[in-house]
């Protein structure tokens, strides 16, 4: 009988985009960071921003914050790329510095041009969602800027200002949206990597993250087949600082992942486009399966299960 990893690997090699194949090879087959950066470069436009469905629920080819933030997350967090002078990194910094989709406080999470291409309903410009009006997206972008921009630059100072404003905008208790919480968590991680925690109210942010993550994780596992917040949204190993207070449910997710894998090596995608663009959604769903495979295998790897 094939193992969880073997089945997942077969799906990746049969279905994944070159970008996701490079990511898989980096994490599990001694692939290189440069190979990931090279694959990612094909999604970067001449202005330095990213488009072309890096985020698979939106097929907009234009440079928009959604795709640029997704690409930046792969660079800064997933593969922990260190060369700030790399042309892909410099191009993205240039795009952020241009002010595109930036109103002086936040980067827009949707773009009007999304409506011209296949996309999920929540990326339509008239979508109504609390996470479209808070620091979802923007907090993570601020972290990327602070990690890679020159410390003496106006762009670095902008990233620090936005991060502080994002922290000030938080409610006194906790962050109530899982996507927004993820962006704040990534921002905190990138400030740590940049050695810039003294530039923000870091301890206050971490305290709110611990409280929020614990409350956001859905412990009723009967809901996990849908689109809900599981431990793996925030925790990637039993070494995570968020693991101790969520130990039992985080440990259980390893068992859940292993028992819910499909025969083809993939896992269920717990959302859909509501009947819109059915042909394109079928393609995007397959792209998401590769993303979910990488995420689930990294989780199992972080817990020593593969």
Image (cartoon, rainbow, N blue to C red):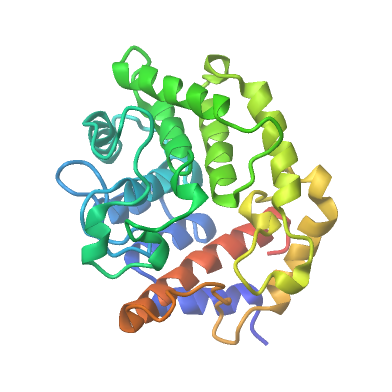
In the rendered image, the residue lying farthest to the left is 46
Kindly tell me whether residue 301 is visible in this rendering. no
Q: In the image shown, does 237 or 156 lie closer to the viewer?
A: 156
In the rendered image, the residue lying farthest to the top is 152
Q: Give the residue displayed 68% in from the left and 22% down from the top.
A: 203
Q: In this rendering, is residue 254 above or below 187?
A: below
In the rendered image, the residue lying farthest to the right is 248
Q: Give the residue displayed 69% in from the left and 33% down from the top.
A: 208
Q: In this rendering, is residue 4 above or below 205?
A: below
Residue 299: name its quadrant: bottom right
How far across and how far down the image is residue 28, in percent?
A: 53, 60
Q: Give the residue displayed 74% in from the left and 64% down from the top.
A: 253
Image quarter of the C terminus: bottom right
Using residue 221 as the reference point, say whether residue 261 is left or right of it.
left
Q: Give the residue displayed 22% in from the left and 57% down from the top.
A: 113
Kindly tell me whether residue 88 is visible in this rendering. yes
Using residue 156 as the reference point, say whether residue 292 is left or right of it.
right
How far across and how far down the image is residue 259, in percent?
A: 72, 78
Q: In the image shown, does 224 or 71 lie closer to the viewer?
A: 224
How far across and how far down the image is residue 73, in percent?
A: 44, 45
Image quarter of the N terminus: bottom right
Q: In this rendering, is residue 219 above or below 278?
A: above
């Amino acid at each position: 009988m094939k193992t969880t990893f073997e089945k997942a690997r077969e799906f990746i090699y049969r279905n994944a985009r070159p970008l996701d194949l490079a990511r898989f090879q980096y994490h599990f087959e001694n692939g290189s960071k440069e190979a990931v950066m090279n694959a990612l470069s094909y999604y970067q436009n001449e202005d330095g921003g990213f488009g072309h469905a890096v985020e698979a629920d939106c097929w907009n080819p234009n440079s928009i914050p959604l795709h640029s933030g997704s690409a930046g997350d792969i660079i800064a967090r997933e593969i922990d790329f260190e060369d700030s002078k790399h042309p892909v990194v410099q191009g993205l910094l240039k795009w952020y510095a241009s002010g595109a989709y930036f109103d002086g406080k936040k980067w827009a999470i949707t773009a009007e041009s999304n409506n011209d291409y296949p996309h999920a309903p929540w990326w339509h410009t008239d979508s109504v969602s609390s996470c479209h009006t808070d620091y979802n997206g923007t907090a993570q972008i601020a972290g990327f800027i602070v990690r890679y921009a020159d410390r003496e630059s106006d762009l670095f100072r902008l990233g620090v200002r936005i991060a502080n404003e994002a922290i000030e905008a938080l409610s006194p208790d906790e962050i109530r949206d899982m996507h927004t919480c993820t962006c704040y968590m990534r921002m905190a991680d990138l400030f740590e990597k940049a050695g810039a925690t003294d530039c923000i109210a870091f301890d206050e942010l971490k305290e709110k993250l611990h409280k929020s993550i614990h409350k956001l994780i859905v412990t009723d596992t009967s809901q996990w087949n849908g689109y809900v917040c599981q431990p793996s949204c925030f925790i990637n190993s039993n070494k995570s600082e968020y693991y101790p207070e969520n130990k039992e449910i985080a440990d259980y997710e390893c068992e859940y992942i292993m028992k819910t894998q499909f025969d083809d090596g993939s896992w269920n995608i717990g959302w859909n486009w509501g009947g819109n663009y059915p042909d394109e959604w079928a393609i995007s769903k397959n792209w998401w399966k590769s993303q979910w495979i990488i995420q689930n295998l990294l989780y199992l790897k972080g817990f020593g299960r593969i």
